[in-house]
Image: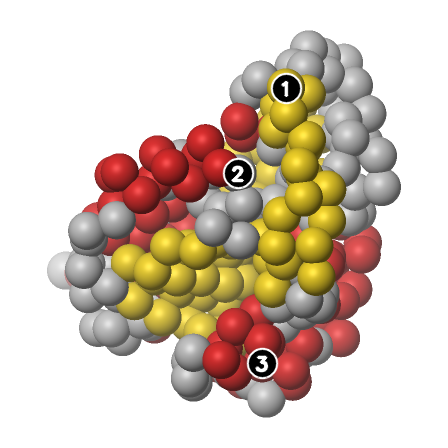
Amino acid sequence: MKKILKEFLYRKGYKISKINKNNLLNDNPFLAIQSRLGSNPIIFDIGANLGQTIFKVKKTFPNSYLHSFEPSKDCFKRITQDYGNVENVFLNNKAVGCEKGSLEFNEYSWSALNSFLKRAYTKSEIIDTYFVDIISVDDYCSENDIPYINLLKTDTEGFELNVLQGANKMMNQNKVQFVFVEIFFHENYIGQSSFSDIFNYLSQNGFKMIRFYDFEYTNEGFASRTDALFINEKFIK
């Protein structure tokens, strides 16, 4: 009976297949990787802003160890109020880059645009500028005895390549499983990381791109930005 039904539907243009419980193509990136991360994943949230990713991660992975990084003074105050007492959430009022140091940081009137970089065009004004401390992923992991990262998420408004370069040692040792990264196709920031920069760097470090999420477009209809999910090829089953 099943065979007859499948043949009938196939002639009508439909195909029946088993559900892949490890479906990496789920429209929700956190659900896409959920079955591959184990019960106590270690997750890095780089560019926490107001805690949007913290909320999503703790909802999907309640037993996760979440290391969150946010350089903005005002945003960090907000996430400390909301998540400072949440178990296994470690909040860091620092930026992440390719090496330790400090750099001038721009606060915009819309906090989601905060960046080390100047906007190429914007209706949002810079309301404050100050120096912030920077740490690399490799140094942070070494100093805090973090053995691996199941998911490294970075949303740093054009600074993504610098963040990934600072995780070079962890990547080379296959200690990063997934990377979820913001991608720009249109010039949103002066000197921003390009898609080819990020794609080539991750490819050279053994990562395969899975898919894009949530495209945004310019007024002319061209691709402006999106998020992309990558997997370390050593973890492909």
Up/down of 227 relative to 106, above or below: below
The residues bearing labels 2 and 1 have C-alpha atoms spaced at a distance of 12 Å
Q: Marks 1 and 3, how far apart in space?
A: 36 Å
Q: Nearer the viewer, mark 1 or mark 3?
A: 1
Q: State the image quarter where residue 99 is shown.
A: bottom right
Neighbor class of circle 2 (other Cα within 10 Å; few <14, some 14-19, many 20+) is many
From this viewpoint, which residue is outermost toward the bottom?
Answer: 173
**What crowding class fits label 1: few (fewer than 14 Cα within 10 Å), some (14-19), or many (20 or more)?**
few
Mark 2–mark 3 distance (CA, rounded to whole Å) = 26 Å
Foreground residue, 83 or 200?
83
Q: Nearest the camera: 124 or 150?
A: 124
User: Residue at left 31%, top 43%?
Assistant: 80
> Is 43 above or below relative to 159?
below
Residue 180 left/right relative to 53:
right
Q: Position of residue 183 (x, y in %)?
A: 67, 44
The residue that label 3 is drawn on is 170
Amino acid type, callout 3: Met
Q: Residue furthest left?
A: 1
Q: Identify which amino acid the numbered label 2 is placed on.
A: Ser
User: According to the image, label 1 marks what residue?
Assistant: 127
Residue 30: percent from the left, percent from the top? 36, 54
Mark nearer the N terminus (2 vs 3): 2
Q: Residue at x 30, y 67 (%)?
A: 65
Q: Which image quadrant: the N terminus?
A: bottom left
The residue where tag 2 is placed is 72
Q: Quadrant location of residue 157?
A: top right
Which quadrant of the view contains residue 102?
A: bottom right
Residue 236 located left or right of residue 79? right
Residue closest to the eye, 128 or 223: 128
Q: Earlier in the sequence, mark 2 or mark 1?
A: 2
